[in-house]
Each structure stands twice: as C-alpha cells, then as structure tokens.
Image (cartoon, grey):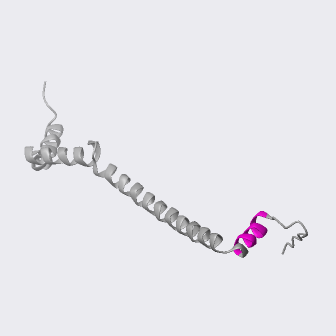
Amino acid sequence: MQDNPIAVETLKNWYLKLKPYLNKYIIVTVFFVVVIGFVDENSVVRRIKLEREISRIRKEIKHYEQLRDQSAARLESLKAGKEELERVAREEYLMKKENEDIFLIEE
C-alpha cells in the first residue's frame, strides 16, 4: 500500500507551519490565559461584570442620598412653619379648613 505523495506533502507543510506554535511554553501560557480569563471563578470577564454592577449600585446610592437630603430639608421646612405645613397639606393632599371650599383648576 503506497501513500499518496500529495497528501504526505500537505501534512508536512501543515506540520511545518504549525511547528513554531507547538512549543510547550507557549501551550502552557495560552492554557493559563484561557483559564484565568474565562474559566476561573475570579475570571476577568466576571470581574468586569461585577465592576459594572458596582458602578450601577453606586449611582443608585447617590440618587437615594439626594432624595434623602431633599426629604430632610423638606421636613425641616415643614417643622419650621405652620404656613408651610398648611400649604403642603392643601396642595398635595387637598385638605381644607372647615369653612373653605376648594376649586381645582386644570390647565
């Protein structure tokens, strides 16, 4: 049984092109890069996702801190004066005194 000379030549050319990449140090290095980058529990991909989530949560914290500060300032203004408390009660909760009538005007 004779080997096909074209197939053998093709395999030799393929091996010669691939030979520089078959170095054991290169193979081990590529393996560790793949493991650290994608497979490991603390992979680079997972760290990037976690950093994005941390950034999103920090923005959310800032938003709620601003709301807290606004609410605290509003509470202080409501505690400070009876007029402010009455104004908020009338405008937002449609409360009125006994001898008053309320007319709602829509724009």
Q: Within the magenta stretch, is there residue 87?
A: yes
For this rendering, which residue is in front, 58 or 91? 91
For this rendering, which residue is in front, 36 or 56? 56
In the rendered view, tell whether residue 14 sits above or below residue 90.
Answer: above
- In this picture, residue 59 sits left or right of residue 47: right
- In this picture, residue 107 sits left or right of residue 25: right
In the rendered view, tell whether residue 91 sits above or below residue 5.
Answer: below
For this rendering, which residue is in front, 89 or 3? 89
Image location (x, y in percent) of residue 57? 44, 57
Residue at (14, 49) in percent of width and height: 17
Q: Which contiguous range is marked in magenta?
A: 84-93
Q: Quadrant of residue 88?
A: bottom right
In the rendered view, tell whether residue 12 sits above or below residue 82.
Answer: above
Task: Tell me the chief SS of the magenta region.
Answer: helix
Residue at (84, 75) in percent of width and height: 107
Residue at (14, 44) in percent of width and height: 27
In the rendered view, tell whether residue 21 sits above or below residue 68.
Answer: above
Image quarter (top left, top right, bottom left or bottom right) of the N terminus:
top left
Q: How many marks?
A: 0
Q: Within the magenta stretch, is there residue 90?
A: yes
Residue at (28, 42) in percent of width and height: 41
Image location (x, y in percent) of residue 52? 40, 57
